[in-house]
Amino acid sequence: MCELNVFLLRGDERERVMDSVARILVEGNSIQLTGILGDQMTVEGSIREVNFSRGEALILAN
């Protein structure tokens, strides 16, 4: 499996918002994260980077 840890970037701060994310759905400024166990979270922002080799996605906060 290829799960990602998702981080929210606010200026110089980097906050881990969710681990083991299997699905990312973007609708405008809203990003819905779904974990491997079906847990969900929605954050506002834009995707800056998805790096599969590091297993992480970076989201710029609005």
Image: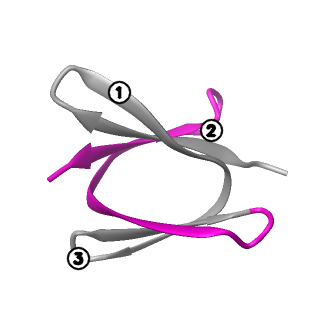
Q: Is residue 4 above or below residue 22?
A: above
Label 3, on which residue? 28
Mark whose residue sits in front, 1 or 3:
1
The residue that label 1 is drawn on is 14
Alpha carbons under labels 2 and 1: distance apart: 18 Å
Of mark 2 and mark 1, the one earlier in the sequence is: 1
Q: Earlier in the sequence, mark 1 or mark 3?
A: 1
Residue 21 versus residue 12 in the image, above or below: below
Say which of 17 and 46 sits in front.
17
Q: Secondary structure at mark 2?
A: loop
Which quarter of the figure has residue 49? Answer: top left
Please tell me whether mark 2 or mark 1 is closer to you in this view: 1
Where disc 1 sits, the SS reads strand
Q: Residue at x 65, y 29 (%)?
A: 53
Q: Earlier in the sequence, mark 2 or mark 3?
A: 3
Residue interval drawn in magenta? 36-62
Type of residue at label 1?
Answer: Arg
Label annotation for residue 52: 2
Q: Is residue 8 above or below residue 21?
A: above
Magenta part mainly helix, strand or loop? strand
Q: Residue at x 56, y 37 (%)?
A: 56
Q: Position of residue 58 (x, y in %)?
A: 40, 40
56 in magenta: yes
